[in-house]
Image (cartoon, rainbow, N blue to C red):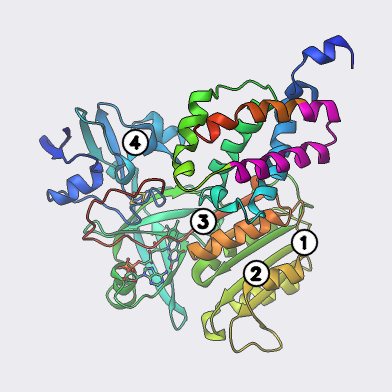
């Protein structure tokens, strides 16, 4: 049996159980969302004892050096004794400054942090509510803008999005943890063509990245594809169209599955991308949003010649359901 | 080919690590578009999959590899359970050959690589 010590109490783990599941099962509150090692909401710090390598995959070296690990992917072997602490030290207090609907189901949330918060446009943060509820959101603003901007899709029954839409008010205190992710613009090859694609609020990081690239003087073509089911699902259309008018190298291509028009293409996103960028060899790509879409676009772009090192993607994995039972995954499936 | 060249590994002769990185992408695209075998190479994490293939290519070209026959066996055991057989092995070997040819590797060197790959057949298929 492995056991975990948290705030001077020991908690036994069942065989194969993650630190996150074990603590939650025994009533300890730990922020979490994807439970798949992607969002980093569940960061904890090992004060004593060793953590399996798998629980540190994707963490920045500076976090690893301080003993941080992901509680959801940490399954200590039998006999391990681990002493852990929360990641409160990594969280920055912040206040909501405004809540504005950008479309029927996309809410723009602006925040200011009470302490300096360094990030790159396109990275994501964990938004942590006072009671510990945590969800990841990509940052749509630029660091120089002062306020942080998130685009939150309103989901029926959504814990965080529902709260933001109905109950949160400007002035409310929250915390931010992060930033995380390598989906950001890196200067150095200003002539390299870029392709940015996302559906729904997958636009949030792309909105940051595209403006970051333009401000950095990117001169090569920048293709921005934004997909939605219907035209009402698109947002920031005017802002992006104006941006494209000011920057001839920017090609903004909104796209819907139904209800297209002169300005909005109709059809699937990958077909549109293939039409506009038939040979993306040597391009750099940023793909964000729906996990299925990100996965399939990534593969298609790679197969059409884009190099893996030029593919940057963030999948917006949903939060994992609460009453998760620990199952043994079938052999051969990982 | 002079004797010195013959002594050098194919890995060194084709340009070492940078050449391997290029070869992996060419090879990976081939296996992903081959319906007979693509399902063995589908992985949510494309970087992880590419890293595995790089280890394989490094081994069969005689580069610095820590891959042993035992690892080969263990690494493919679950795929063999899912039906991995000679047909799949031949398909992969075919793509390996084409990849090297496309990268301009000379025929005798390609033959050497394929011979090394062939010697791994029993381990890969867990026989
Ligand atoms: C790296 C990363 C970046 C992200 N960036 C953003 C972002 O910029 N903007 C944004 O809006 N979201 C983003 N997300 C998703 C976000 O973290 C939350 O999962 C999402 O806001 C739902 O949280 P909630 O508490 O409102 O709903 P929950 O209470 O978690 O879920 C409510 C219900 O909706 C279902 N559900 C969850 N997601 C979806 C979905 N996509 N489609 C349909 N049903 C769903 C759930 O299964 C559940 O039944 C990101 C996620 C990750 C991992
Ligand atoms: S990384 Fe652990 S909950 Fe998302």
Q: Which residue is mark 3?
A: A314
- Asked whether residue A117 appears in the rendered view, the answer is no
Q: Earlier in the sequence, mark 3 or mark 2?
A: 2
Q: Residue at x 55, y 61 (%)?
A: A294
Nearest the eye: A72 or A95 = A72
Q: Which residue is mark 2?
A: A270
Mark 4 → mark 1, Cα distance in angstroms: 40 Å
Q: In which quadrant of the rendered view does residue A62 lie?
A: top left
Mark 3 → mark 2, Cα distance in angstroms: 17 Å
> Label 1's element?
loop
Q: Residue at x 54, y 81 (%)?
A: A229
Q: Is residue A244 above or below residue A209?
A: below
Q: Chain of mark 3?
A: A
> Label 3's element?
strand
What is the span of residues highlighted in magenta in the rendered image? Answer: B86-111
- Residue A91 location, x and y as percent? 33, 47
Mark 2 → mark 1, Cα distance in angstroms: 18 Å
Q: Which residue is mark 1?
A: A221
> Label 2's element?
helix
Name the magenta segment's main secondary structure. helix
> For the residue with label 3, is its CB less than 8 Å from the closest atom of ligand 1?
yes
């Amino acid at each position: 049996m492995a056991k975990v010590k948290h705030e001077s109490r020991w908690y036994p783990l069942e065989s194969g159980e993650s630190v996150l599941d074990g603590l939650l099962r025994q009533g300890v509150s730990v922020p979490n969302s994807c439970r798949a090692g992607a969002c980093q909401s569940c960061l904890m710090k090992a004060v004593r004892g060793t953590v399996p390598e798998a629980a540190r995959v994707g963490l920045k070296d500076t976090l690893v050096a301080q003993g941080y690990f992901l509680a959801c992917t940490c399954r200590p072997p039998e006999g391990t004794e681990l002493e852990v602490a929360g990641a409160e030290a990594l969280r920055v207090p912040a206040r909501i400054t405004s809540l504005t609907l950008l479309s029927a189901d996309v809410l723009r949330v602006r925040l200011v942090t009470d302490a300096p918060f360094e990030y790159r446009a396109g990275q994501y943060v964990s938004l942590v509510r006072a009671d510990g509820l945590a969800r990841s959101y990509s940052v749509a603003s630029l660091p120089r803008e002062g306020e942080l901007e998130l685009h939150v899709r309103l989901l029926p029954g959504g814990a965080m999005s529902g709260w933001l839409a109905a109950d949160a008010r400007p002035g409310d205190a929250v915390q931010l943890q992060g930033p995380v992710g390598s989906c950001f613009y890196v200067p150095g090859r200003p002539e390299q063509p870029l392709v940015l694609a996302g559906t729904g609020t997958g636009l949030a990081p792309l909105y940051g990245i595209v403006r970051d690239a333009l401000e950095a003087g990117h001169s090569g073509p920048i293709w921005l594809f934004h997909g939605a089911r219907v035209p009402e699902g698109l947002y920031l259309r005017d802002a992006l169209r104006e941006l494209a008018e000011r920057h001839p190298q920017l090609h903004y291509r909104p796209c819907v599955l139904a209800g297209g028009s002169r300005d909005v293409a109709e059809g699937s996103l990958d077909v549109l991308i293939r039409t506009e960028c038939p040979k993306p060899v040597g391009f750099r790509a940023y793909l964000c949003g729906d996990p299925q879409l990100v996965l399939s676009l990534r593969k298609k772009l790679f197969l059409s010649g884009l190099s893996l090192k030029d593919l940057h993607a963030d999948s917006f994995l949903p939060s994992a359901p609460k009453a998760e039972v620990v199952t043994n995954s079938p052999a051969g499936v990982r | 080919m002079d004797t010195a060249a013959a002594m050098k590994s194919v890995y060194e002769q084709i340009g070492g690590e940078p050449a391997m990185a290029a070869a992996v992408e060419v090879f990976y695209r081939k296996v992903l578009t081959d319906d007979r075998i693509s399902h063995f190479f589908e992985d949510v994490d494309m970087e992880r999959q590419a890293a595995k293939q790089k280890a394989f290519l490094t081994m069969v070209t005689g580069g610095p590899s820590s891959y042993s026959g035992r690892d080969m066996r263990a690494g493919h055991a679950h795929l063999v359970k899912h039906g991995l057989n000679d047909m799949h092995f031949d398909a992969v070997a075919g793509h390996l050959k084409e990849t090297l040819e496309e990268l301009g590797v000379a025929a005798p060197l390609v033959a050497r690589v394929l011979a090394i790959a062939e010697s791994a057949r029993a381990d890969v298929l867990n026989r």
